[in-house]
Amino acid sequence: MSRREEKRAEREDRLAEQRSRAALAARRSGEDGEDGEDGDGGDARSGGRSGGRSGANGGTRERPGPHGGAGQAGGDRAGRRDPDSARDGARDTSGRRSAARPARGDGAPARPRELYVPPRGWHGAGGGRVGYLDPPTMWRATTVQACGMWPFAAGSGSPMTGVPLGQHLFTGATVCGDPLNWFTRARYISNPSLFMLGMPGLGKSTLVNRMLIGLAATGVVPLVLGDLKPDYADTVRALGGQVISIGRGRGGINVLDPGAMGEAAVRIGGEAGEVLKAETHGRVLNMVAALITIVRGRPMDDHEQSVLSAVLHHLRERTAPGRAPLLPDLLRVLTEGPDRVRAVTLDRGNETRYRDAVDPLHRSLLGILDGPLGDTFTSETSTRIDPNAPAVCIDISGIGEADTQLTAAAMLAAWSDGLGTVAASHALADAGLAPRRWFFTVLDELWRPLRAASGIVDRIDALTRLNRSLGLGDAKITHTLKDAEALGTDADRAKARGFVERAGMVVCAGLPRTEMEELGKVVGLSQREIELVSSWSSPPGWGMTGEHEEPPGRGRFLIKVGGRPGIPIKVAITDAERRLHNTNTRWTTDEEAVEQAAARAARDVARAAGQTGPGGWSA
């Protein structure tokens, strides 16, 4: 209630208390008057007085009324002394005046009334006055749900646009956000990208996994182009998406396959289709050049790229529709030496000059086919990306951590194929042949591809600069800024530092103080924010009972956007998220592993049953 209503209620309580005390005083004075007089009620007047006195003691004497009925009780003085009549002017607890209760016609005494007690007690010493009332229970709801109960709009100081992330660490207010919604709807950021840093085991992947689930519910297509652990494969399966495995003996990618872009070019046709075919040619050329760079450890020469482009044009013109050339076909064309390819080498009809020009390229291609990359890129694509899938995950967890060259090559191939699918989707939408779709890419464990080869840095750099025009949001996750400092060249280190500078959102989990101070030079952190995030990097305490204790910083993050104050949040995951996202699967006990395998098998059976109709036909 308001302050004015509270004061009015207090005044009414004081008035009711005064009347109650007046009635009590009247009762006591009536008892004293009865002891001082000796009338027995012999005549009518004394009877009236004694009736008044007896009324003060709880009894009443009735007089016949004009119609033979029961009249008033006692005389006027008795009515004035009667505590019941004194209470006639008092207000009851509901605020209405109480009427005097008439005496019963059979002469029985009226039932006495109890004194009025204010809801919060009497004022004064010994009155039992209560100065504090328990606050009502608070509930949180949206303005749509609670508009009738609370029609007032008030901001809580926390953003409410995007995926629900958690609660504000200090106020408890709900905090929502993700790169796409903060870029498109709220316009808090100018670049739909997120960069996250933090020590291992504090929940970085879990927070991005929640963004992935929330964005998928709004129609955004998550693309995990290179899942290294894997952290997101089970989530993509639960969303009904597509999981593609790449590795030795698991599956491969044909880097010469135009994929979704080639299919879209044929479907669109005309001038727009020819433009898309030219873009497809450039994407394939860059992918083959990246593989050669990984094998050699240095970039290709300019004339070699010209020769490779001529070979790809020759293959596309002579390959049957619906079939994609393979890397062995490149070797065959180089061996044959058609006129179009010889013209680029400037051999002038001299076979020796031609062989000197193409032999280094020939040797590098042989290294891709039979070298450290194995047979991953020598055959047809094992599984193509489905352009209509609600989510896609390319799982490269089968590649060993020590196999850095194959990891880099697989990630480059995954990005080329995934971004080609994005470009094809937008080309079809521009032509009016498909609905417009947005995409959200996740690049976890950024330090591994950064150290694999220098070409990876250039590819990520291009991705972070062009994602606005591609209709693409991205999330990059790594441990510390030192991951960028460990790169081989100054140019690569500068490009890696630019990832943080250009990110629309920077999210920090627990980091040592030295790392936070270094990050503060790039992002702009206050001293209090540095101390807060540094405190989250402490290890858990020594458990005396043997129970598992979590680190103090697990699930706590600081969201920074430009020069604005950071938003500290606490993320509490659900049971479904905990089952889908377990980054410590290798450390589970045998019983837990058996339960997880059984649950996964049950989900696969249920999914297969849902995709197969009656009679065994495929839905």
Image (cartoon, grey):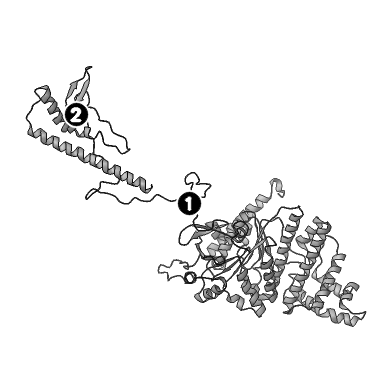
State how many labels appear: 2
The outermost residue toward the right is 349
Q: Secondary structure at mark 1?
A: loop
Q: Going by the image, does 23 lie left or right of 482?
A: left
Vertical side of 308 occupied by 617: above or below: above
Q: Going by the image, does 296 lie left or right of 109?
A: right
Q: Is residue 403 visible?
A: no
Q: Disc 2 designates what residue?
A: 109
Vertical side of 119 occupied by 239: above or below: below
Q: Quadrant of residue 382?
A: bottom right
Residue 577 point in image, percent of width and height: 55, 59
Residue drawn at x 72%, y 76% is 294
Q: Quadrant of residue 287?
A: bottom right
Q: Disc 1 designates what residue?
A: 140
Residue 477 point in image, percent of width and height: 60, 68
Residue drawn at x 33%, y 44% is 8
Q: Going by the image, does 96 lie left or right of 321?
A: left
Vertical side of 307 occupied by 273: above or below: above
Q: Secondary structure at mark 2?
A: loop
Q: Earlier in the sequence, mark 2 or mark 1?
A: 2
- The three-letter amino acid code for the residue at tag 2 is Pro
Residue 503 point in image, percent of width and height: 61, 67
- The three-letter amino acid code for the residue at tag 1 is Arg
Count residues near mark 1 (Cα–Cα under 10 Å), then give few for <14, some for 14-19, many for 20+.
Answer: few
Checking the image for residue 323, the label placed there is none
Residue 110 point in image, percent of width and height: 21, 30
